[in-house]
Image (cartoon, rainbow, N blue to C red):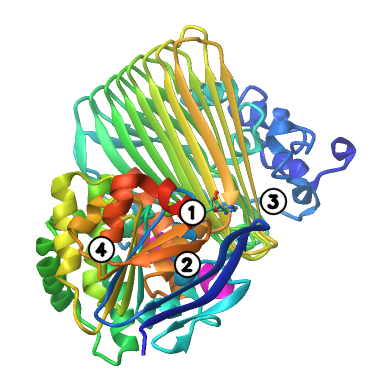
Amino acid sequence: MLHNVRDNYIISVKDHVSKFEEKSFRKLASNDFKSWPSPREEAWRLSRLGVLSRKEITPITPNFKKPISFVSKLNGSKIIRFVDGAFREDLSSKLPPGLSLNILGEEDSLRCFHKFKNSNLKDHPSTNASFSCTPSILKLTIEKDIKIKDLFEIIYEGGDDESSVHPALYIELKDNSSITIIERFNHLSSLIMPLQLVELKKNASINSLKIFNDNQQSYNLSANCTFLSEKSNYNSFSLIKGGLFTRSETHAYLKGEDCNLNLNGVYLSSKNQHHDLTTAIYHDVPNCTSKQIVRGVLGGKSTGVFQGKVRVAPDAQKTDGQQMSRAILLSENAIANAKPELEIYADDVICAHGATVGEIEDDQLFYLKSRGIPEKKAKKILITAFLRDIINESVEESIKNFVFEEAELALSDIISTEI
Amino acid sequence: MSLLEIKNAKLKLDDKDILKGLSLSVNSGEVHAIMGPNGSGKSTLSYMLAGRDGYDLESGEVFLEGQSLSDMEADERARSGLFLAFQYPVELPGVGGMSFLREAVNTRRKFLGEEELDHLAFVKEARKVASKMFVKDEMLKRAVNVGFSGGEKKRFEILQMAMLKPKVSILDETDSGLDVDALKIVSDGVNAQRNDENAIVVITHYQRLLDYIVPDFVHILSDGNIIKSGGPELALEVEKNGYAGLINAA
Ligand SMILES: Nc1ncnc2c1ncn2[C@@H]1O[C@H](COP(=O)(O)OP(=O)(O)O)[C@@H](O)[C@H]1O
Ligand SMILES: [Mg+2]
């Protein structure tokens, strides 16, 4: 009976917003934060949060003087930094023309809040907790016709083991603009609840890479809500390797014709980690494509979850939606769950999906061994290739090697214990 | 001493007898052809020799240069000089052709006590062999067998054979799916490797390949056993009368 438990965290969120007015977005959000999702809710059945109601955590008060020492591995990238969930202009790069960063005022924040509340992320715990507790919502705007060539890195860090952090970012790409954004989650906090709203206007295009690498005790419940207009492109890749529990949840609404969405991802899980990639793709109009490739490699007693919902509305004819997930288990105690959910209400569509969970393919292993390559080495080659393959297919050329190296760091940990 | 010696090999798959006491002796410098109808056990024989999991002998034994293979895994057999050109080469998405070849070649060289080739030396060597097999550089940059045509896959198999310099090569239906031009390229590649030190076992359903790779001996495999052996003329008999006549006579 989760609902009747006196939940310390929920109470601390209410305390945190007590000084704000009744009609402020923070108060509205905190009023809606009544309980953690129950495992009886389908969306949370495979990723349970019960333990959070027993933890002693409170929302952080950001320390604007906190020293940090992040060194980028990407040459010449522009950097935007969040520490303790708060934007730190003093630590961030100067922006090129055509691009701006603003902290939203009450009215714009409220609008942003309503966009989440009108989406199917309305009951996500991060929606309510982070709109309540975020230091502020940062808006990144890319102006019309601006194509940003520099790589943009957004670094989220800080926190401590008794607190939750609540970074909130709103990205708007105006008509014909484009950008590549790399987000890295490197927190020390117990609970991390990042919010992100992305709006792609006509013919806008974004390459988004997210690397989840928070510390090994943390919970990261990231929530992303994306709206695509006509002819826009959203190419997203998530690499989940950190945290005790990391769930990256993305809801994408295809609202204009001829837009294109890729929501790919990889999770690399070891020890007792729990990694979850949850997506929902809403094809509301005709002639759009969406594609998802998700792969996992699991060792130890880890669990991996992929939940992918694709809904094709009655009017969304000529939709092309593809979904493929595959997990390789390197340990007998690891578990992978894949849950595709297709709701197709239009008749003239191509929608394919497939999910496999298993070991390394026998025939591939035999082929390598028949060339003299020892079994251990052959397995390493195949698992590395399993990742290289999806990274090659998903990630923009200029950051492929970077992503691959980031994946390989986690992979070599798993391989060294399991193979 | 024979390079490959199969003695009374019996093997079951799923409780079904597939190899039923097969014996064969192959000396260095020889090319043997094993011909047989579909389902006669040709690929099973090749997997058994290569050491695929699940293809262990129920009884009998196999020797490579006098050494028993029974306790050797597939990789050890390969390093010792056994090579299998697959009937259906396996696709390896994400494994680059060049790095795959290099790993295989250096593993074999290490086993032979030869120095491993560095990247440049290796690429040079690979390109040289590849051009003889009409394998384009571009193909070596792609993932192994992924998106290759049937002919490209077979050429890549023989390219691997040429680079690994095995003692005994088993070619399982290397002719299947090849047009005449490709058949010629692949056969030339195989013939170029014939020497007094090695041996080749060509497994095929059709006589056609044996016009290009002329064997010293031909064996007819039927229902898990060699029912007849002879010279190249035996292949012509199969071509003329089909397998049925030979099998009924046996
Ligand atoms: N994994 C298996 N389990 C049971 N029977 C098999 C298996 N693989 C092959 N067979 C059977 O073994 C026989 C020989 O097959 P195979 O060696 O592939 O023949 P060939 O290569 O000569 O066409 C066939 O009857 C085939 O159906
Ligand atoms: Mg066969």
Find out whether residue A415 is within the magenta segment.
Answer: yes
Circle 1 residue: B40
In the image, are marks 1 and 4 on the same chain? yes
In front here: A26 or A366? Answer: A366
Q: Which mark is residue A379?
A: 2
Q: Amino acid at mark 1?
A: Ser
In the image, are marks 4 and 2 on the same chain? no
Q: Is residue B19 left or right of residue A90?
A: right
Is residue B161 visible in this depiction of the protein? Answer: yes
Residue A325 locus on image (x, y percent) = 52, 42
Dot 1 falls on a residue whose secondary structure is loop
> Of tags 3 and 2, which is closer to the observer?
2
Mark 2, residues whose alpha carbon is within 10 Å: few (<14), some, or many (≥20)?
A: many
Q: Is residue A68 above or below residue A11?
A: below
Dot 3 falls on a residue whose secondary structure is strand
Q: Which residues are magenta?
A: A406-418
Circle 3 residue: A58
Dot 2 falls on a residue whose secondary structure is helix
Q: Amino acid at mark 2?
A: Lys
Residue A259 locus on image (x, y percent) = 34, 22
In the image, are marks 1 and 3 on the same chain? no
In front here: A418 or A120? Answer: A418
